[in-house]
Image: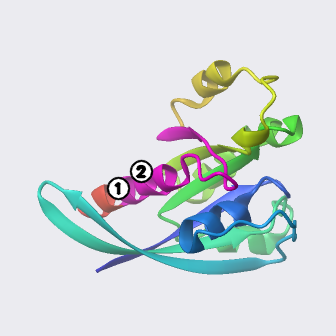
Amino acid sequence: MISYKIVLVGDFGAGKTSLIKRYVDNTFSEEYKSSIGVSISKKILEVKIDDILYETTMMIWDIEGKTDFKPIFHHHLNGSKGFVVVADLTRQTTIDSIQEHIKLCKTICKDAPIVLALNKIDLYSNNIDLDALKDSFDEEIIGIFKTSAKNTSYVKELFDLLNLEIVKSIKK
């Protein structure tokens, strides 16, 4: 079995915890509860690469938003094999922070794959040019998904891609 750590990074209220709860427990709550510190969830997965089936344990770290000024935040990112940068499509400030979060992830773990979750697509009001956004980050990330923890849009696909890329990198 392959076991590894991933970290979700993003501003407060972007939906990091909701994405994790949807993926791990298949649940969603309308009630917002701010994460304090870090919480860790576990998901057992299987992935097939070159006709070999690998069982993996994804340890998913949920870190409170906007903690880049706290020294402990960098410690939480260490050892991560991959990242999900989460932005809330209904709040421009979270989109403006994407580059900062990607840079932080690359500084700590430069070769770890990064997936971008443009979250809350169910509430999206077409005020953001998604194609331009995608073009600006193509070199730094392995995928962009328009997600919704509420209606499950692309949540599984996002984590499945990250799992696949991490296992490929471990098995090199």
Of the pair 1 and 26, the residue shown nearer to us: 26
Q: Which residues are magenta?
A: 142-166
Q: Residue visible at 88% across and 39% down? A: 93
Indicate the amino acid at tag 1.
Leu
Left or right? Give the position of 13 relative to 42.
right
Residue tagged by mark 1?
164
Instruction: Please tell me the numbered disc located at residue 161.
Output: 2
- Residue 53: image x %, image y %? 19, 67
Real-space CA distance between mark 1 and mark 2, rounded to the nearest whole angstrom: 5 Å
Q: Secondary structure at mark 1?
A: helix
State left or right for residue 7 relative to residue 66.
Answer: left
The residue at 49%/57% (across/down) is 159
Assign the C terminus to one quadrant of the image. bottom left
Residue 41 percent across, percent down from the top left: 59, 79
- Specify whether 1 is left or right of 132: left
* 146 magenta-colored: yes
**Quick check: can you spot residue 100?**
no
Residue at point 56%, 65% (across, down): 23
Residue 67 within the magenta-colored segment of the rendering: no
Q: Quadrant of the N terminus?
A: bottom left
* Residue 122 on image: x %, y %: 73, 41
Task: Tell me which amino acid carries mark 2.
Answer: Leu
State how the image is colored.
Answer: rainbow
- The circle drawn on residue 100 is none
- List x then y, in percent, for residue 145: 57, 40
Tag 2's secondary structure? helix
